[in-house]
Image (spheres, helix red, strand yellow):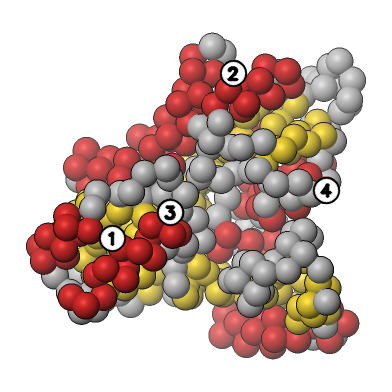
Amino acid sequence: MYGSPLTTNARKLLLLGSGELGKEVALEAQRLGVETIAVDRYANAPAMQVAHRCHVTDMLDGAAIRKIIEDEKPDFIVPEIEAIATETLLELEQEGFNVIPTARAARLTMDREGIRRLAAETLGLPTAPYQFADSLDELKVAVKEIGLPCVIKPIMSSSGKGQSVCRTEEDIEKCWNYAMEGGRAKKARIIVEGFITFESEITLLTIRSVSGTSFCAPIGHVQKDGDYIESWQPHAMTVEQIKQAEEIALRITDELGGYGLYGVELFITQDGVLFSEVSPRPHDTGMVTMATQDLSEFALHVRAILGFPIPTIRLLSPGATHTLKADRESASFRVGGLEEALSLPNTQVRVFGKPETKVGRRMAVALCTAGNTDEARDLARQAAESLRIQYD
């Protein structure tokens, strides 16, 4: 039992990261009477617009993060982005604070090296071949060992920033520079992965709660430059493929532990299912669940965090999402076309309310349901194409 928000008996949930995903987590927490605090590196982030309180700080500044947490004394610390002072989270957890799902999960998944070594070398999960490099010269050696084409990524980035496909030796230096520009870690280190010929790539939302481990129906998605453009649910898979995917997701999430929702990214190939990445938080491709499921990924995350049971997860309808992205930087703009988009049947729109646009930044998403995923994808694409950003 707990009291109302802003009273002495309130339960507090503090978000580290306040984008569009954090916004939905805050709203779901408030539906269950939880007080919410949003923290991010810039003012007026989406979750800040709906939270009870907010703080702006450098998310990699451990001392600043510690002060906010010690002042707020939250019952739950919920990382919603990768770039956080995770060593501070480890310390705070040892001091008795509850980090979701665990501080170790936040630290390991903050960079691609930690989680890839855990998955491939400790757990023996099937992955693409990989190498790490700390310099351009090391990258050239790694590319030679992995072979061309290959995928080059910063060890820490989000939304595909800094990720590129290297197809020729002449591309190597350009890919290195792009990774350095896009990485969010304060170090020059990248991962080189073998280029996987896959039939599809999916997100398997995996929830650890008092009810055990649960899975949502698989979500297919299309990415461009490492960032998702559209997603749909359910993605067509064989019984054997689903079994392999769930086994991989179970093993990696059991190892990471805690309560909460994980987004497990997987490649479906002719030779089986390969592990790609995992996020210990709701996944951008999972926004489709706001239209397709009785409980969205955000509702599931909050239920798990609070220790409530999750007896069933029902897929109500096939559905799809399609994103609206900006093509330039601006602090003065307007999002239009909502009337046209919402005139389409079974369509919803989420406008995120971000204070500034940047090239490739997601500003809104269309959510649609239909009789099958192909119809839903067509509808979502039409809706997203109806939306537009007008720059002043």
Residue depicted at x 70% and y 66%: 357
Q: Is residue 130 visible?
A: no
Q: Alpha-carbon neighbours of circle 3 within 10 Å: few (<14), some, or many (≥20)?
A: many
Mark toward the viewer: 4 or 1: 4
Task: Identify the amino acid type marked 4.
Answer: Gln
Question: Label 3's element?
Answer: loop
What percent of the width, then of the height, locates residue 25?
Answer: 70, 45
Task: Identify the amino acid type marked 3.
Answer: Gly
Return the disc, 3 or 2, that comes first in the chain's sequence. 2
Mark toward the viewer: 1 or 2: 2
Residue depicted at x 83% and y 48%: 49
> Marks 3/2: CA distance?
29 Å
> Marks 1/2: CA distance?
35 Å
Question: Label 1's element?
Answer: strand
Q: Alpha-carbon neighbours of circle 4 within 10 Å: few (<14), some, or many (≥20)?
A: some
Return the disc, 2 or 4, that comes first in the chain's sequence. 4
Q: Is residue 54 above or below residue 361?
A: above
Residue depicted at x 69% and y 24%: 68
Q: Disc 3 designates what residue?
A: 183
Image-based side of 234 in relation to 195, left or right = right
Q: Disc 1 designates what residue?
A: 274
Question: Label 2's element?
Answer: loop
Q: Is residue 194 visible?
A: yes
Q: Disc 2 designates what residue?
A: 97
Q: Disc 4 designates what residue?
A: 49
What percent of the width, then of the height, locates residue 235?
Answer: 48, 72
Return the disc, 4 or 1, that comes first in the chain's sequence. 4
